[in-house]
Image (tube, helix red, strand yellow):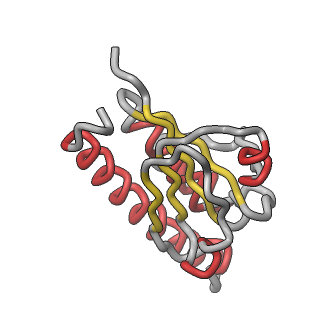
Amino acid sequence: MSIKHKVLFVCIHNSARSQMAEAFLNKYGSENFEAESAGLEPGDLNPNVVEVMKEVGIDISQKITQSVFDLFKKGRMFNAVITVCDEASAERCPIFPGVTRRMGWSFPDPSAAKGTREEILEQTRKVRDEIKEKITGFIAEGKELKYWI
């Protein structure tokens, strides 16, 4: 049995991007990774994100948003903290003790999508697919790096 490496995904509201990244890593990388997500200013789960994740067979409708600062105050330890918001927002993320990797992956915010309902869903699907692709690459990279396994 391998040790699972704990990964925290952080964005502003923990309502979209970080939730998708957490769900994809837990689904596809559960052999080696255990993911959580949190926000700098936790909000409500984005219903469009819930819908587009269901389209790919992942139900996040029961997930709750949580504060990155609450996790920090509880002394939670992570092997990696990955921000999935823009760079300026990512700089506000606290430094977790014991973190071996800190990365920034910038994705557009699905909550800022504009247009008709279908256009908004299409923009949200695009972000979902970009996050999934990044996660599958991260999992593959993790298998190559001895300090992850």
- Residue reaching furthest to the bottom: 115
In the image, 125 versus 78, the foreground residue is: 78
Q: Is residue 88 left or right of residue 45?
A: left
Q: Residue at x 47, y 67 (%)?
A: 104
Q: Residue at x 54, y 56 (%)?
A: 52
Q: Does any portion of residue 64 appear in the rendered image?
A: yes
Seen in the picture, residue 116 relative to 83 is either above or below; the reply is below
In the image, 49 versus 67, the foreground residue is: 67
x, y percent for residue 17 = 57, 61
Seen in the picture, residue 9 relative to 115 is either above or below; the reply is above
Q: Find residue 3 and report its image quarter.
A: top left
- Residue reaching furthest to the front: 97
Q: Find residue 95 and report its image quarter.
A: bottom right
Q: Is residue 100 left or right of residue 16?
A: left
Q: Residue at x 28, y 43 (%)?
A: 142
Q: Is residue 52 left or right of residue 11?
A: left
x, y percent for residue 96 = 61, 51
Q: Report the quarter where the N terminus lies.
A: top left
